[in-house]
Amino acid sequence: MCKIKPFELQFEHQALLIKFVFFIKIFKMGDQGFLKQKPGFATIAIHAGQDPSKWESSAVVAPIVTSTTFKQTGPAEYKDFDYGRSGNPTRNTLEECLAALDGGKHALAFASGLGAITTITSLLSQKDHILCCDDVYGGTNRLLRNVVQRMGIEISFADFTIEDSIKKEIKENTKMIWVETPTNPLLKVIDLTAVVNIAKGKGILIAVDNTFLTPYLQRPLDFGVDIVMYSITKYMNGHSDVIMGAAVVNDSDLEKRLRFLQNSMGIVPSPMDCYLVNRSLKTLAIRMEQHKKSALVVANWLLKHPKIVEVMHPGLPFHPQYEIAKRQMTGHSGTFSFKHSGDLKESKKMLSALKVFTLAESLGGYESLAELPTLMTHASVPEEQRTRLGITHNLIRLSVGLEDVEDLINDLDQAIKVAFE
Ligand SMILES: *Cc1c(COP(=O)(O)O)cnc(C)c1O
């Protein structure tokens, strides 16, 4: 005989329902309410494109094929490869892995990040217009203003954190929107869904520079953008020993056009470098997980320091675009910026006093780096544009590496003391 009264039965059901809803919420959310990491990422990084049966030797580790040319069975009769610029077995292996990591159909590797951007912007023609977010990598800014513009392509910049400023800047001839999120060096987060909705149906290609996050922390194709671009030089390779770039796309026609440009313009990486990057990707997931954790610890420590006036890190709850960050990122990487209460003199003293952090440009390697954007990475950005954006002499950018985080904090502590003594 059933002893549960109807009321209790109802109550039990409700409790179960609450538990279930809670479970669903937890399941969808990652750390701190950020997007949850797609399952299988580390497995894809290790196995995608790496099938040993594609090599006659059944090599488990993809071989480095250095040959620039491939024997043909008759004139213009060959299997997969004819000439090394057009395709190379080691490069193709890397490209397959890169495409899979972003959930994309195709990936193309280039000789550098800027080589990738040069190729992508070459999809356009004279009189076309590129709308770019204002706080963009210094080299991208320089390429667009000093090279691409000279080829007859119009360039303009806008603050992409304000949707109306994107809408206002779109013209009849706008053919590409260039997004970098989070931005560099101010770590503003741009809403990818909003940009996609604004550009929808207008025949505008949206390209996203995903260098700061890698597909481990953000997958722009999932939000409907057309092209994901990387400076592989940074986190993707992660060992500060290769300069390389990449583009990932879903659309096969777009892939064909980019493939044509990759071959025609010749901005291709070497098989040796492709081997190194393919190998580096095998540890991308665990590297990014550690960068993410350590950088948050360092950011929280800086927040409490009396000489630090601002910490720009999308993983901190008071970040102006924290809610957007949680919707489109699974977390933030090791790169962020802060402002201290001094000026150029204190920045110089602090950076020169660092012992574990290395004073150097770049980011995303296993070693921690610190730099002064005004004189280093962003020196090529016109001073007027820098000042307007707030890239000032007291702004320091860190790339938190994989050393013990206590050592990094102790190093910053002593360097800040030296700067202000
Ligand atoms: C470094 C970097 C680039 C340029 O890449 P290279 O590999 O140095 O040519 C582009 N975008 C971002 C965000 C970068 O950090």
Image (cartoon, helix red, strand yellow):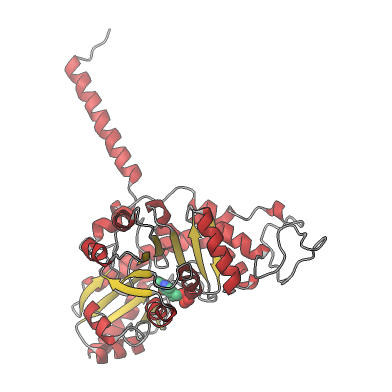
Q: Which residue is drawn at 35% across and 56% down?
A: 202
Placement of 47 over or under 260, stated as above or below: above
Res. 264 image quadrant: bottom right
Q: Which residue is drawn at 35% across and 65% down?
A: 174
Name the spot of residue 92 as percent of width and height, x first. Answer: 62, 61
Q: Specify whether 91 is left or right of 125.
A: right
Q: Which residue is drawn at 43% across and 73% down?
A: 126
Q: Specify whether 39 is left or right of 329.
A: right
Determine the quadrant in which ligand 1 lies: bottom left
The one nearer the camera, 375 or 282, is 375
Q: Residue furthest right?
A: 74
Whether residue 210 is visible to the viewer of this picture, yes or no, is yes
Q: Specify whether 104 is left or right of 411.
A: right
Placement of 129 over or under 45, stated as above or below: below
Name the spot of residue 394 as percent of width and height, x first. Answer: 25, 84
Q: In which quarter of the image is the N terminus?
A: top left
Name the spot of residue 24 as percent of width and height, x first. Answer: 32, 39
Q: Quadrant of the C terminus?
A: bottom left
Res. 324 image quadrant: bottom left
State the count of labels.
0
Placement of 405 over or under 222, stated as above or below: below
Whether residue 136 is visible to the viewer of this picture, yes or no, is no
Name the spot of residue 173 as percent of width and height, x first. Answer: 35, 66
Res. 353 image quadrant: bottom left
